[in-house]
Amino acid sequence: MEIFKTKTALRAFLEPLKASGLKIALVPTMGALHNGHISLIKLAQQNADVIICSIFVNPTQFTDPKDLEKYPRPIEHDLAMLEEAGCNGVFMPDVKEMYPEKEDWHIDLGKAEFLLEGEFRRGHYQGVTQIVNKLFDAVKPDVAMFGQKDFQQVLMIKNMLKHFNLPITIITCPIIREEDGLAMSSRNIHLSEKDRKNALVLSKSLQFVIDHFNEYSLSQLEEKAEALYAGIEGVELDYFTIANGETLEPAKSKEEGNLVALVAAKVGTTRLIDNMIIK
Ligand code: PAF
């Protein structure tokens, strides 16, 4: 597995491979890898010939400097996991390589930018699309893999692709869960034993909606799912919503084609997100 710290070195590696007709996949990450990321690598291997994983903790997408500071960076462990998974190359630039100078970035990502996560983390998706665009430019992949756990992120990245008319196929991978239902996340490492137990309410509340979808109205489903959070000490619900999966607006009717239940909550000091596609 090759490791690249600069765009120049990465491009020099990729150019002859592309010229020989090989298909390139990019798996963008911020490191602190878990089996969810490895599932992205595995799916990439089914869709391309050469797999590049990027590891870059992107400062412009953090709205809280403390969150950026405490973001886990277990690089040796990450590299061992990628090697084992058969990844071909890792791009791990430093901040100067990606942001050589101060730059302004603002693109129109549509109304959905300001809903849900966008309401709690203003500017987050501008930072995400800024770095993903830079990574796309460095790798020029044919396909790029993203996890469904960041449902809104995938939507925003697709909107960014439309904005620049980029010829890249986005493949979304299903959420990988622990045996008890907790969605895998790099942030789970910050959960205390008690938080870890409390965090199960996220997947349970989503599963409640899936299991009882035909029994209750949309507002009853949301109310009952939200009620599961009441009285859990140390868990603060930011939102629980059943939304249209294309606009992220609250669903108006069960008959809408593409429905998803999404949740965000602070568990202890860690903010977690999760979702389940209803249909
Ligand atoms: O999902 C993530 O890990 C990040 O938001 C991404 C897509 C790698 C951009 O920094």
Image (cartoon, rainbow, N blue to C red):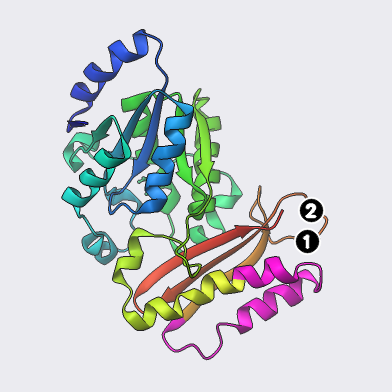
Q: Residue 182: percent from the left, percent from the top?
A: 47, 67
Q: Is residue 17 left or right of residue 80?
A: right
Q: Residues within 10 Å of mark 2 (few under 14, many from 20)?
A: few
User: Quick check: can you spot residue 26?
Assistant: yes
Q: Is residue 109 left or right of residue 50?
A: right
Q: Secondary structure at mark 2?
A: loop
Range shown magenta: 206-235
Q: Residue 84: percent from the left, percent from the top?
A: 27, 41
Residue at x-position 35% and y-position 51%:
61
The reply to whether discs 2 and 1 touch (Cβ–Cβ < 8 Å) is yes
Label drawn at residue 256: 2
Q: CA distance from mark 2 to mark 1?
A: 8 Å
Residue at x-position 36% and y-position 14%:
18
Q: Nearer the viewer, residue 211 or 167?
A: 211
Q: Residue furthest top?
A: 20
Camera-near label (2 vs 1) is 2
Residue 19 sits in quarter: top left
Q: Is residue 20 left or right of residue 172?
A: left
Residue type indicated by callout 2: Glu
Q: Residue 222: percent from the left, percent from the top?
A: 68, 74
Q: Residue 153: percent from the left, percent from the top?
A: 49, 48
Residue type indicated by callout 1: Lys
Q: Nearer the viewer, residue 84 or 232?
A: 84
Residue 42 sits in quarter: top left
The relative height of residue 74 versus residue 70 in the rendered view (above or below) is: above
User: Quick check: can you spot residue 105?
Assistant: no
Q: Secondary structure at mark 1?
A: loop
Is residue 203 within the magenta segment?
Answer: no
> Disc 1 marks which residue?
252
